[in-house]
Image (spheres, rainbow, N blue to C red):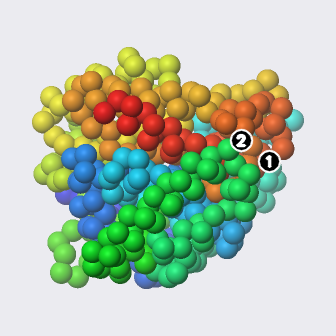
């Protein structure tokens, strides 16, 4: 295999990239980006990798979630805090119910690019470049918005830095103090059908905390929480510009995020994305789904984690509730045959997307839950470990997915349908999902 360097992907066939009108302007921006300070550090990345290795062994559990795509306008205090709150609350439910450490990873601070099924979008006979996410172009169907603009790369880096700065401040301060989980409450939580179960868990955890403190256990770790970031590493010029050699370390790190992942549409072994990802030291996720034969999967393991480093590779399967039963067992078998270790994670969102008669892209709570429950059961039957979940969710009160305890139906979707891309679980649906995971796992173990 040819030797790797941060630009070696440029010799490979590359999918899902924007076509910029001026290569020169793009290159100017990339030069600027490549000297800006990193957003995360190699120590954080190595710490995450060690924790993911524990999840692969069944000793911890990964909770990864956030928007399908962040918008630049989402860089506001309430949106960031609400996202943090829902992930913290879900993690409490999971810690309590699964009795395991929970690794919290947001799809946040850089999730600004989307793969699209078509290069162009046509409305009333007019065709324009598809919207690829705020890092590339704008969502409005105007010529000005849809032209890819390299300056957006700098704005995206800036938004990611501001978001992360706020998350870091919140995670280190009183906000994240486990003694004061009331800080994590969202305004509407009192009215939620899940409120009483959540309160019970919180008071249980508070009692355990008091017990530990009576025993004299250190309290520093309880005053703050660890929170990691992730995004789809789709825009390879951006990822390359933030890929750095770190002093005293031998490998390159992508310092734009802790956990970048390869999307389902860009996972070709010979493609540019796999080439880029094989050289970085970060833990790496790969979305896998139907239509990927055994040798493809085994090739991914071999290429992306040749040394079989623990915690390095995460297979995020996203088959859909109707296909997982048939598709997951052979995938598990293929990994077992390879003799390598992976962290298994279920994304129950991306195989369960459908369109309503009125044209909304939605997902049904029941299908999402069914895929998750099947995933737990299949892994347990096959002797592998489901070590995490990957959701599209928000801490806000949106109406994008159908179902859940509040019984949202098709007619409710128009009330607060805010996503520009995939539908997200709202606050209540996300909490309910965390409770359902716990219920299912405790019923089957
Ligand atoms: C996503 O995670 O938003 C996404 C596009 O997923 P996938 O690559 O699995 O389709
Ligand atoms: Co999505």
Q: Are marks 1 and 2 in contact (CB under 8 Å)?
A: yes
Image disc number at residue 416: 1
Q: Position of residue 311 (x, y in %)?
A: 24, 54
Q: Which of 98 and 127 is in front in this view?
A: 98
Q: How many marks?
A: 2
Q: How far apart are marks 1 and 2 (CA)?
A: 7 Å
Circle 2: element type: loop
Mark 1 Cα-neighbour bin, 10 Å: few <14, some 14–19, many ≥20: few
Q: Which of 122 and 308 is in front in this view?
A: 308
Q: Where is residue 337 in the image (x, y as percent from the top left)?
A: 15, 28
Asked whether, in this view, residue 394 is left or right of residue 139, the answer is left
The residue lying at 38 percent from left, 37 percent from top is 442
The residue lying at 41 percent from left, 53 percent from top is 96
The residue lying at 19 percent from left, 43 percent from top is 341
Mark 2 Cα-neighbour bin, 10 Å: few <14, some 14–19, many ≥20: many
Examine the image and state in which quarter residue 133 appears: bottom right
Q: Nearer the viewer, residue 367 or 273?
A: 367
Circle 1: element type: loop
Examine the image and state in which quarter residue 115 appears: top right
Q: Nearer the viewer, residue 49 or 244?
A: 49
Asked whether, in this view, residue 300 is left or right of residue 142, the answer is left
Q: Where is residue 427 in the image (x, y as percent from the top left)?
A: 64, 51
Q: Position of residue 351 (x, y in %)?
A: 52, 30
The residue lying at 50 percent from left, 45 percent from top is 434
Asked whether, in this view, residue 241 is left or right of residue 367, the answer is left
The residue lying furthest to the top in this view is 326
Residue at the disc numbered 2: 400
């Amino acid at each position: 295999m040819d030797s790797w360097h941060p630009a070696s992907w440029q010799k490979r066939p590359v999918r899902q990239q924007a076509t910029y009108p001026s290569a020169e302007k793009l290159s100017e921006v990339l030069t600027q980006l490549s000297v800006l300070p990193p957003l995360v550090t190699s120590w954080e990345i190595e710490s995450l990798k060690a924790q993911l290795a524990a999840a692969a062994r069944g000793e911890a559990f990964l909770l990864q979630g956030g928007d399908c795509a962040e918008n630049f306008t989402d860089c506001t205090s309430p949106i960031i805090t609400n996202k943090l709150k829902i992930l913290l609350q879900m993690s409490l439910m999971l810690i309590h119910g699964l009795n395991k450490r929970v690794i919290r990873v947001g799809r946040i601070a850089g999730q600004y690019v989307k793969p699209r099924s078509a290069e162009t979008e046509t409305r009333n006979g007019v065709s324009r470049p598809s919207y690829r996410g705020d890092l590339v172009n704008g969502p409005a169907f105007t010529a000005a918005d849809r032209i890819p603009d390299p300056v957006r790369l700098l704005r995206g880096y800036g938004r990611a830095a501001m978001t992360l700065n706020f998350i870091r401040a919140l995670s280190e301060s009183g906000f994240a103090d486990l003694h004061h989980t009331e800080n994590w409450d969202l305004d509407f939580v009192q009215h939620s059908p899940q409120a009483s179960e959540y309160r019970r868990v919180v008071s249980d955890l508070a009692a355990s905390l008091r017990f530990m403190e009576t025993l004299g256990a250190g309290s520093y770790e309880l005053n703050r929480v660890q929170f990691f970031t992730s995004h789809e590493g789709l825009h390879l010029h951006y990822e390359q510009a933030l890929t750095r050699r770190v002093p005293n370390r031998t490998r390159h790190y992508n310092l734009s995020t802790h956990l970048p992942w390869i999307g389902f549409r860009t996972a070709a072994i010979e493609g540019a994305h796999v080439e880029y990802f094989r050289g970085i030291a970060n833990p790496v996720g790969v979305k896998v789904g139907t239509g990927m034969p055994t040798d493809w999967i085994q090739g991914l393991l071999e290429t992306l984690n040749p040394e079989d480093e623990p915690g390095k590779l995460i297979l995020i399967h996203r088959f859909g509730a109707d296909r997982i039963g048939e598709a997951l067992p052979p995938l598990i078998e293929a990994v077992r045959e390879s003799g390598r270790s992976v962290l298994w994670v279920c994304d129950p969102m991306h195989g369960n997307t459908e369109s309503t008669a009125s044209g909304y892209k939605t997902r049904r709570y029941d299908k999402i839950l069914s895929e998750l429950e099947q995933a737990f059961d299949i892994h347990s039957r096959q002797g592998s470990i489901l070590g995490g979940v990957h959701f599209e969710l928000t801490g806000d009160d949106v109406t994008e997915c159908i179902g859940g305890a509040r019984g949202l139906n098709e007619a409710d979707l128009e009330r607060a349908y805010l996503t520009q891309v995939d539908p997200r679980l709202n606050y209540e649906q996300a909490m309910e999902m965390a409770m359902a995971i716990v219920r299912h796992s405790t019923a089957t173990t």
